[in-house]
Image (cartoon, rainbow, N blue to C red):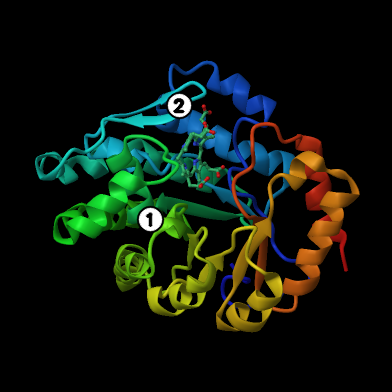
Amino acid sequence: MQALAGQTLSVPPVWMIRQAGRYLFDYRELRSHYPSFLALCYTPEAAAEVTLQPIRRFGFDAAILFSDILVIPDALGQTVTFAKGEGPQLKALGGQEDIAALKPDRVLEHLQPVFETVERVRSALPPETTLLGFCGAPWTVATYMVEGKGSKDFANIRRFAYGDPDGFSRLIDILVEATTQYLLKQVEAGAECIQLFETWGGVLSENGFERWVIEPTKKIVANLKAVHPDLPVIGFPRGAGLHLIDFKQQTGVDAVGLDSGVPLKWVAEKLQPLGPVQGNLDPMYLITGGDEMIDETRRILDVLRDGPFIFNLGHGITPETSPENVGKLVDFIRNYR
Ligand code: CP3
């Protein structure tokens, strides 16, 4: 919370994207007792336990709520399943009738278990550990809703957004509203900071980024801050490149998450003076381990620790990661001067 408020700390705080999950034995064990990934997400006692596992093991400075960005389409009535080894599957939205059939009115009721998870985690966490709530940003959630699954080229959604912007904006507007309501409830339940994941922001044209990433994010941030003026919001527009400056300045986010490709010298000169940054070790270094992992971590710390900074990965931990390397990384960050 201090780093998010703009303080430069001698030891930067550290947490990791996907810090809970399949690389941990305790997670795989617990997961095996649930019929589906979403069933686990909607069982507060279990989701709270999974959120806490990496905190107990590694002592991260922040816990991130265990859930998924795709609970929003699920709550809107577009059933989501996670087939083993294939990633998420949804019945792709075909057109305006499908958008009109979404059920924004039932979102909060459907996601009630998530709020209970947040309450449980907050009361179990040490007071010095920040609890992060999160949500997918509208564009990224819409990619799964329109493509029906993960995509390589995002052809369907780009054709929709560029060819029928007014029609597409109906979907984005629904997502802005649902996201706002959902995040406000997370905060009410005990989330102290919110991260917005814009995983697929980098596939858009310049105008597309402005209209479908910056504009909806700006609305959500304004809606949240209207109720909670001091709530810190982290935006993570993966692949945004040179858009990062506009993203920071126009959306009103407090901090910006960096993917592993962003040049750090540029960040230190141009972006970090505008506010805290978070990132950006390539998660593959957690698999290589060794001197390579430590050298790369030192490089990141050396460039970014003279300003407000939160250590993180540039993207999510992969299931092949060795927990030992995660422990070594955290130790190195805590002891490096
Ligand atoms: O520890 C944490 O970071 C919190 C939990 C979390 C998950 N997903 C758990 C999860 C968070 C923050 C997410 C965000 C998420 N989900 C994003 C944005 C961040 C990113 O990584 O880009 C996206 C794009 C998704 C959508 C999603 N969920 C996909 C594509 C998949 C399949 C991934 C795969 O490798 O199979 C998921 C499933 C998912 N979400 C798992 C976990 C732990 C694996 C499910 C399992 O245990 O079977």
Instruction: Tell me if 139 is positioned left or right of 289 in this view.
Output: left
Tell me where residue 11 appears, x and y as whole percent: 77, 67
- Of the 4 image quadrants, the one containing the N terminus is bottom right
- Of the 4 image quadrants, the one containing the C terminus is bottom right
Q: Is 219 situated above or below 40?
A: below
Pointers 1 and 2 in contact (CB under 8 A)? no
| Of callouts 1 and 2, the N-terminal one | 2
Instruction: Tell me if 310 is positioned left or right of 136 in this view.
Output: right
Instruction: Name the residue at 48% across, 68% down.
Output: 232
Mark 1 burial class by Cα count in 10 Å: few <14, some 14-19, many 20+: many
Residue 11 visible somewhere in the drawing: no
**Residue labelled with disc 2:** 37
Tell me where residue 285 appears, x and y as whole percent: 76, 47
Task: Kindly indicate the quadrant of the structure image that contains residue 2.
Answer: bottom right
Cα–Cα gap, marks 1 and 2: 21 Å
- The kind of residue tagged 1 is Ala
Q: Nearer the viewer, residue 78 or 36?
A: 78
- The kind of residue tagged 2 is Phe
Tell me where residue 216 appears, x and y as whole percent: 30, 64
User: Element at badge 1?
Assistant: loop
**Residue labelled with disc 1:** 137
Instruction: Name the residue at 86% across, 51% down.
Output: 292
Task: Kindly indicate the quadrant of the structure image that contains residue 204.
Answer: bottom left
Q: Is 289 situated above or below 180?
A: above
Q: Is 331 situated above or below 192?
A: above
Q: Which mark is residue 166?
A: none
Tell me where residue 115 appears, x and y as whole percent: 38, 43
Q: How many marks?
A: 2
Instruction: Name the residue at 75% across, 36% down.
Output: 323
Instruction: Tell me if 83 is positioned left or right of 126 in this view.
Output: left
Residue 65 visible somewhere in the drawing: yes
Disc 2 under 8 Å from ligand 1? The reply is yes
